[in-house]
Amino acid sequence: MFKNWMMKLLVLTVFLTPIVYADDCSSQFYNGQAPQLSAQLQSRTTFLCFEQYALTYSGVTRSPLWTAEYLTNNRVKEARRLKRQDSFHEEDRLPVSDRNTLKDFKGIGRLSIDRGHMSPNSDFSTYSAQFESFSLANIIAQDSNNNQILWEGIESATRTLATQHEKLFVVTGPIFDQRDHLLNGRIMIPTRIFKAIYDPNRKEAAAYIVQNAPGMDYEVVSIHDLERQIGINVFPGITESIKMKAARLPEPTPHNDKGGRSHSRHAANNDMSAVVERGLKAIFR
């Protein structure tokens, strides 16, 4: 009883304490180099630094374009000791005209859409960092089935990999293949979602890509192939030879296994650069 009361008091103290945001996020990026956007994506973007992650937010999509974090064995172990406290909140550092709001997500339950974290709450080792993960700047309109099953399995597999390999650099974000799919007429709903992982000890990297839809299919692709599809240089600090080869990533193991076993699909190696460039120009015009 006393322990539960003290825990609630601690969480309440975190929420009521004025937030002091980190002003240097270089530790979240390999070699201190943040992901770089192509020219098509740069309109109405805002860079935000948090305690244990960073992101670039788009006023065009009203969502993050990427989030980045330095995920370590110690951070994952410390995070496991914390109890989740949902605290979704609007990000007042964003321009009002670009900002997504709590009202934008009204009625999402009947649409089978979740407020999906890009950098997940369970990656963060303090209550203040976990609170910051609930900033709407870190949130996309995510299919509920995908968020709760396959994507949860990918997030869990990534944390397990961090405990096995000691440290990883992780970049996560949405992929927009069409412009006209909007939530409540304001928030662009992603077609797909990616999570890119670089292991600095083994000097190898790869990325998961999934559809933002029900199902258990996923792809593992090279960083080179991912970057051609999204128009973002996710790891500017690593060599092209590392980017060209997809490392083996663990199979997602969802804790909620109602969706059945996940299935890896072979990624096509077709050169889609011109097609992707035209698509980005159309979406972010």
Image: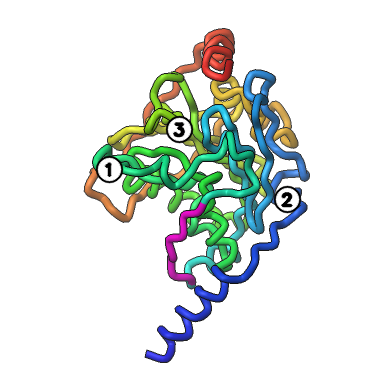
Is 154 colored magenta in this rendering?
no
Q: Note whether residue 218 is visible.
A: yes
Considering the whole magenta stretch, tell me its main secondary structure: loop
> Label 2, on which residue?
25
Q: Using the numbered discs, state the Cα–Cα distance from disc 3 to disc 1 in whole angstroms.
A: 31 Å
For the point 26% across and 50% down, the residue is: 257
Viewer-proximal residue among 161 and 273 = 273
The percent position of residue 140, horizontal first and vertical second, equals 46, 39
Which marked residue is nearer to the observer: mark 2 or mark 3?
3
The image quadrant that residue 60 belongs to is top right
Quick one: label 2 or label 3, which is nearer the N terminus? 2
Q: Which residue is mark 3?
A: 187
Question: Which badge, 1 or 2, comes first in the chain's sequence?
Answer: 2
Q: Residue at x 53, y 57 (%)?
A: 123
Query: In the image shown, does 91 or 1 lie closer to the viewer?
Result: 91
Q: Earlier in the sequence, mark 3 or mark 1?
A: 3
Q: Residue 97, percent across and down?
A: 58, 34
Residue at the location (70% across, 30% down)? 36
Say which element carries label 2: loop
115 with respect to 137 (left or right) = left
Badge 2 amino acid: Cys
Task: Please provide the residue range marked out in magenta.
Answer: 82-89
